[in-house]
Every structure is written in structure tokens, then in C-alpha cells.
């Protein structure tokens, strides 16, 4: 049997994910959207690129979830993207309804799949997917930290004039304004970042990382980032399908880890064929702990807002 990935939402992030997965030769892709013709058109375009991109993967566009039966991984990008001036949280209730609906339909046909959630506000949407799917927490994983840490790595590498390949970056917490980058766990070829960069400069890069999504939204005027988000999804899919057990920052339900119980937070996990196979706990300073708990508090507000709205 060929490996099968369903990508829900054929917009910027979803279609670019599909393209990346095909071109990496990872799996066949089923691209789903609510708009008729959109996933079919993009799929046909990608099929026609296959001879030039030298891969033998297939892509199918569909509006019908029965086509996605027995997918190994389901990537959820369906929803509304942020517009300039619109916070991620403004999207909350609209996207909760969309994500709830698509997850319900998708898991009906693929009860053993691993879900990767991309739609914002990310941490809250992972809660919706957990609730609607009834899947164990190992199989419902949010993409945020891989993107946030890639942004941090790109800025560090550029600032120091070194290869991005030698820069690692460590981020915890919720996606967006409340994420918690940890410079002392970020390195350049194993050298802790604070040895190479002044504290003020690190702080500037942290701030830029925190606002990384908004910086791109402001430039694009319409829509939000999608190239780096799609690359981030590709990394996660690759680690799952090849059981690589990469250690990646992902949003998962915490059950006591880091002193947080019953909330989705970005933490380092071991990502393999079983999904989020392990959560890695590191020791935090009092300040880092406080930042993580304030990040958790802002996710709790979203969860409470959804509960109050009956989502
Ligand atoms: N987690 C992250 O780090 C991250 C990064 C980038 C974007 N995002 C989020 O990903 C989502 C998608 O972004 P985008 O730029 O691709 O947006 P987009 O508008 O280009 O695409 C969204 C697609 O979802 C489809 N859609 C809407 N409702 C649907 C439904 N009920 N069923 C199936 N499809 C449906 C739309 O028709 C559209 O094609 C947004 O919520 C965005 O904020 C998250």
C-alpha cells in the first residue's frame, strides 16, 4: 500500500504542503477543500509538474472525505487566514467551527491517522481536534514550534553570518505573541547563543521571532506566511513517516509535564511513527517558568472562550 496523506485546505499553506510532500517523494496526497474545483485544479497542476520534478507520487483533489479513507497522516490547514490588523484570536470561533467540522469528517474515514493541526489560533485548534476526534494525545499534534524555531534560527544565522545548518533554536509555549524562546538552549554548532551574542541583540531577535507571522502579514497585505509553515509541516510529516524520532517543538496536550495539566502547549517531543512518542522536559529558570505559565494562561483563555460559546 502506498503511503497516503490528506491535506485539508487547498489554500496557500495546504497547497504548498502538498507540493513539498510530493516533491520530497514522501507520499501520495489527497488535497481536500470546501470550494469545488480548487483542490482538483491545484492537484491537476501538481500532477502535470511531476514529470519535471522527477517524482512518482500521485495527488488527487477532492471535496469528498470518503476519498481520503485510511490516510496515514491528516494535515489540517482549513480555515481563515489572518488579515492585517486581525489577531490570531479573532479567528478563534470561526476556525473552531471549521476545524471541528473537517476533523469529524476526516477521522471517520481514517480512525488510525496522525493529525497535524496547522490552523490558527493553533493551540486552541489542537484542543478542538482532540475533543472532536477522541484520539489519544500522541496522535493530535500542532505545528507551531518548528516554524517559530526556524524563524529564530534564520534570524540568528543571518545576524552572525553563519550557516543556518549550524544553528539550533529552542522555543516553548503557545504559538505567537506568548511563545517562549530559550536562548540558553539555542546553539551555534553546540556553542550556547549567549556566548556569541549580546543579551540585547538576542532580545531583539526574540522579539522579531515572536512577531514573525505579523511581520509577513504586514508585508503581504493579504494573507499570511505559507512557505516556511509548509516546510515546517514537511519536517513533521517526514519524521512521522520515516519514524525518525526527531526532537521537534510541537503543540501537544500536557498532562502534568512542565507543571501544566490539561492544556495544549508547545514543548519538545520525540516525533516518530507513533506520533508524539515522548515529551522531553528540561529544567527551567524561575523567569522561564513564569513565561511558560503566562503562555499557558493565554491558551486557557481561548479554551474558556470556546467552552462558553459551546464549541
Ligand atoms: N500554525 C502555524 O504556524 C501557521 C502558519 C501559517 C498559517 N497558519 C494558519 O493556517 C490556516 C490556513 O492558512 P492559509 O494561508 O493556507 O489560508 P488560505 O485562505 O490560503 O487557505 C485556507 C483554505 O481553507 C479552505 N477552507 C475553509 N473552510 C473549509 C472547510 N470547512 N473545509 C475545507 N476547507 C476549508 C478555504 O477554502 C481555503 O482554500 C490559517 O488558519 C492560518 O492562520 C498557521
Image (spheres, helix red, strand yellow):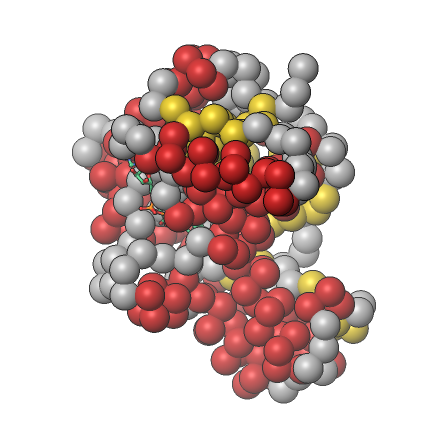
Residue 216 position (above or below residue 145)? below
Instruction: Quarter of the image for the C terminus: give it.
Output: top left
Q: Position of residue 183 (x, y in %)?
A: 63, 70
In front here: 73 or 179? 73
When asked about the image quadrant of residue 195, the answer is bottom right
Q: Which residue in the rendered view is the most extreme toward the right?
A: 190
When asked about the image quadrant of residue 8, the answer is top left
Q: Position of residue 13 (x, y in %)?
A: 43, 47
In front here: 204 or 101? 101
Residue 181 position (above or below residue 47)? below
At horizontal 73% and vertical 65% (from top left) the residue drawn is 165
In front here: 99 or 29? 29
At horizontal 58% and vertical 60% (from top left) the residue drawn is 149
In front here: 285 or 210? 210
Residue 152 position (above or below residue 19)? below
Total count of labels: 0
Residue 292 visible within the image: no
Q: Position of residue 4 (x, y in %)?
A: 58, 24
Q: Can you tell me which quadrant of the image ligand 1 is in?
A: top left
Amino acid at each position: 500500500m502506498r503511503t497516503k496523506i490528506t491535506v485539508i485546505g487547498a489554500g496557500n499553506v495546504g497547497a504548498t504542503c502538498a507540493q513539498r510532500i510530493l516533491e520530497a517523494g514522501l507520499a501520495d496526497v489527497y488535497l481536500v477543500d470546501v470550494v469545488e474545483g480548487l483542490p482538483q485544479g491545484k492537484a491537476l497542476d501538481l500532477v502535470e509538474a511531476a514529470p519535471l520534478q522527477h517524482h512518482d507520487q500521485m495527488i488527487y483533489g477532492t471535496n469528498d472525505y470518503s476519498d481520503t479513507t485510511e490516510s496515514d497522516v491528516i494535515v489540517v490547514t482549513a480555515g481563515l487566514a489572518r488579515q492585517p490588523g486581525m489577531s490570531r484570536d479573532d479567528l478563534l470561533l470561526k476556525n473552531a467551527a471549521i476545524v471541528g467540522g473537517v476533523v469529524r469528517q476526516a477521522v471517520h474515514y481514517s480512525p488510525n491517522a496522525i493529525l497535524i493541526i496547522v490552523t490558527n489560533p493553533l493551540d486552541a485548534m489542537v484542543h478542538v481536534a482532540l475533543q472532536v476526534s477522541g484520539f489519544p494525545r500522541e496522535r493530535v499534534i500542532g505545528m507551531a514550534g518548528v516554524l517559530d524555531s526556524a524563524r529564530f534560527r534564520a534570524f540568528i544565522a543571518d545576524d552572525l553570518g553563519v550557516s543556518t545548518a549550524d544553528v539550533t533554536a529552542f522555543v516553548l509555549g503557545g504559538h505567537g505573541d506568548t511563545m517562549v524562546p530559550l536562548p540558553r538552549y539555542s546553539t551555534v554548532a553546540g556553542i550556547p547563543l549567549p556566548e556569541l551574542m549580546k543579551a540585547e541583540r538576542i532580545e531583539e531577535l526574540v522579539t522579531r521571532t515572536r512577531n514573525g507571522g505579523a511581520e509577513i502579514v504586514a508585508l503581504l497585505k493579504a494573507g499570511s506566511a505559507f512557505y516556511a509553515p509548509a516546510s515546517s509541516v514537511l519536517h513533521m510529516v517526514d519524521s512521522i513517516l520515516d519514524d525518525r524520532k526527531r526532537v521537534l517543538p510541537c503543540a501537544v496536550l500536557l498532562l502534568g509535564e512542565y507543571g501544566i495539566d490539561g492544556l495544549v502547549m508547545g514543548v519538545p517531543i520525540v516525533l516518530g511513527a507513533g506520533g508524539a512518542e515522548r515529551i522531553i522536559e528540561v529544567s527551567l529558570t524561575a523567569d522561564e517558568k513564569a513565561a511558560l505559565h503566562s503562555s499557558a494562561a493565554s491558551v486557557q483563555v481561548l479554551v474558556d472562550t470556546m467552552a462558553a460559546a459551546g464549541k
